[in-house]
Image: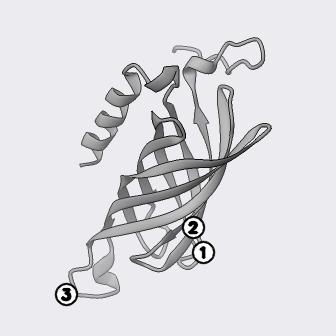
Amino acid sequence: MIGLLMSLVFVIGSSKQVSGRQTGFGGSIIYNFQAEGFGADLRAKVPVYRKLFIVPEVSYYPSFNEYHEYYAGAAAHYEIIQLKKFVFYLTAGAYFNNWINADDFAPGRKLQFNFSPQLGGGIVKRNGCLRPFVENRYDFKWKEDNIRIGILIYPGACGSKKEKCPKINNY
């Protein structure tokens, strides 16, 4: 499932984009306030129409947390306010959740595989090669709030006179 989702992200990202806009690729570090756990995600931000984007994502909370789980799904991001260098956006998503150690907490209750609707918002740098973001989301399935701090990379925006992406050496 995760392999299929990531393949879809790269196929979409490599195709010709809407209105000349590009797909961004990146990830974030996640902190879940209620579970007091850390995770990470990989994502792509794919332009669909004007201020609307689809954001496929895979998130993982490692086994050192009390809850060992991963999520795979997608969200819609809608940009609502643009300030000089930043854009505020709303997000609504649906995710498949695999709670790997569910039997440790609720034996026999079949809670391992779940559907998780989430709503939230964020702020992202408006342009350039490297675009940091902060995003807050609420998970309605588990009644949990989490914050994500990450970066999106837009390879097509690298090399402009205003901003240069770091050079990556091939080994």
First in sequence: mark 1 vs mark 2:
1
Task: Give the CA distance from mark 3 to mark 1.
Answer: 27 Å
Q: Amino acid at mark 2?
A: Asn
The residue tagged with tag 2: helix, strand or loop?
strand
Give the image location of residue 159, x and y in percent. Answer: 67, 12
Q: Residue at x 29, y 34 (%)?
A: 7
Mark number, residue 146: 2
Front residue (pair 71, 39): 71
Task: Give the CA distance from mark 1 to mark 2.
Answer: 6 Å
Compared to residue 134, the image places residue 145 above or below, namely below
Contact? badges 1 and 2 (CB < 8 Å): yes
Of circles 3 and 1, the one toward us is 1
Task: Give the CA distance from mark 2 to mark 3.
Answer: 28 Å
Q: Residue at x 52, y 14 (%)?
A: 170
The residue tagged with tag 1: helix, strand or loop?
loop
Give the image location of residue 94, x and y in percent. Answer: 36, 60
Q: Residue at x 27, y 41 (%)?
A: 3
Give the image location of residue 113, x and y in percent. Answer: 25, 70
- The part of the image, by quadrant, that contains residue 48 is top left
Mark number, residue 108: 3
Would you say 17 lies left or right of 30 here? left
Give the image location of residue 112, x and y in percent. Answer: 26, 73
Mark number, residue 33: 1
First in sequence: mark 2 vs mark 3:
3
Compared to residue 26, the image places residue 155 above or below, namely above
